[in-house]
Amino acid sequence: MHHLSAQDDSHTPTYAGRYFDREVPKHRVPAAGMPADAAYQLVHDELELDANPLLNLATFVTTWMEPQANRLAEEALNKNLVDQDEYPQSHEIHMRVVSMLADLFNAPSGSEAVGTATVGSSEAIMLGLLAHKRAWQNRRRQAGAAVERPNLVMGADVHTCWEKFTNYFEVEARVAPMGDGDFVLSADDVAARVDENTIAVAGLLGTTYTGQMDELEAINDLLADLEKEHGWHIPLHIDAASGGFIVPYTQPKLAWDFRLSHVRSINVSNHKFGLVYPGMGSVVFRDRSDLPEELVFHINYLGGDMPNYSLNFSRPANTVILQYYNFLRLGRDGYRRVMESVMENARYLRAGLQRVEGLQAIGAGDTFPIVALRATDPAELDVYALSDELRRHGWIVPAYTLPPDAQDISVLRMVVKENFSRDLADLLLEHIGEAISRLRPAPARDQAGARQPVC
């Protein structure tokens, strides 16, 4: 007969166990462990304090996938994408995904597009820019010119990772500031900043701040003219983190990708509108010649020869597998229908907010499912207070200032994703109206009609 000891919790209900009336270890690994159910419940309950991903309109990142995708993700949790010799079919799927992206971005038929999956667009951008910096150095050395002062031209609308690149890899950042009503990079901005030491120009297909698009075609034409006039080969790197899975399906005739002559590399966030869980991004080069061979490492200590171009090494294979699942599951027609639905809900939300007194939309709002708003009178309505009020209902709607020279403008931004329905849009509009009513001061009472205190 088995006698339960004082320490035996195998027959004790989870919440009745001794682990729930003790301090949870936070800074030191505990000497002894606990039952799996207890450890799970402690962590699970603590995570309940996080925001509801469905109501998180701050993030671009995918928060929902189909049950079949979830099964695939779980089945591939233990596969490391870098182990190509051990997981050859996972690597094959990786190569298929890169090839499909190159085709989606209209890589020329005569070129040999190359690329890789990354842990996100930050790594993808770093890899793209490192390749352009090295290619610039190689061209300068062949010409007997100095390589000490590389620069990168970009707008103030870029993601933080662009600034990280210039800091980490010692490249001068030539930043075009924003202005009130002028929130994107123009060809004139670029013309005023490029020279023979420019390694690349940043072009954004969907900005983080307002969801707009830089003047990509005009910038490309400028770079083509500069190459003819001065012999400067300045590549245009497109940051399509947000827009790379939207525009190909909603505006297929819009030229922003490899159809433009000086677009030599593109990054995209698969974990945004590629509809894949975090974290996955990709970088695609127009041609193998755009990626200097000396940057590609050939590794043999995992078995076989494995070419590798990355900042990270180990990474899960399941996100790449999920992207392939989505390509098969949705096809171009399925992605088009999803993106049209997302855009329609964004337009509906934007139109509803335009009718709210005190709010003004920023940007045209017809290209990306991002709604950015400012207060018509910041003295009357504080967007930071409005953001806080919306948290009462669980909504996460960030408020922030725009970059220089528009830092005096504070905005609210909402990202409309696949699982944001028309019903949720109506609820959000209702809650915004209620929040603004609470924030606005009550109208002063008419003193003539006010009741006098009883003496």
Image: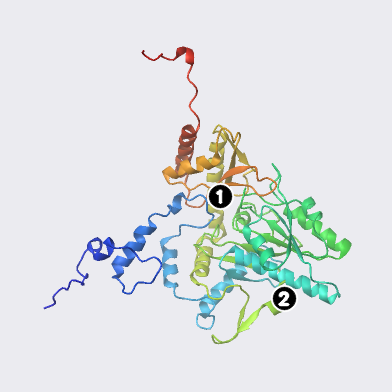
All told, the count of numbered labels is 2
Query: Label 1 sits on what residue type?
Result: Glu
- Name the image quarter holding residue 110: bottom right
Which one is nearer the viewer's eye here, 266 or 153? 153
In the image, taking residue 420 as reference, residue 186 lies left or right, namely: right
Cα separation, mark 1 vs mark 2, equals: 39 Å
In the image, taking residue 70 as reference, residue 223 lies left or right, namely: right
Task: Name the residue carrying label 1.
Answer: 340
| Whole-percent x, y for residue 135 in the image | 75, 72
**Callout 1 secondary element:** helix
At a point 62% along the width and 50% down the height, the residue shown is 209
**Looking at the image, is mark 1 or mark 2 nearer the viewer?**
2
| Whole-percent x, y for residue 54 in the image | 45, 51
**Callout 2 secondary element:** loop
| Outermost residue toward the front in this view | 455
Whether residue 110 appears in this view of the structure is no
Q: Earlier in the sequence, mark 1 or mark 2?
A: 2
| Whole-percent x, y for residue 399 in the image | 55, 46
- Name the image quarter holding residue 307: bottom right
At a point 52% along the width and 54% down the height, the residue shown is 59
Give the answer, above or below, for where 310 lies relative to 47. below
Query: Label 2 sits on what residue type?
Result: Pro
| Mark number displayed over residue 82 | none
Marks 1 & 2, CB-CB < 8 Å contact: no
Q: The N terminus appears in which quarter of the rendering?
A: bottom left
Task: Name the residue carrying label 2.
Answer: 292
Which one is nearer the viewer's eye here, 246 or 435? 435
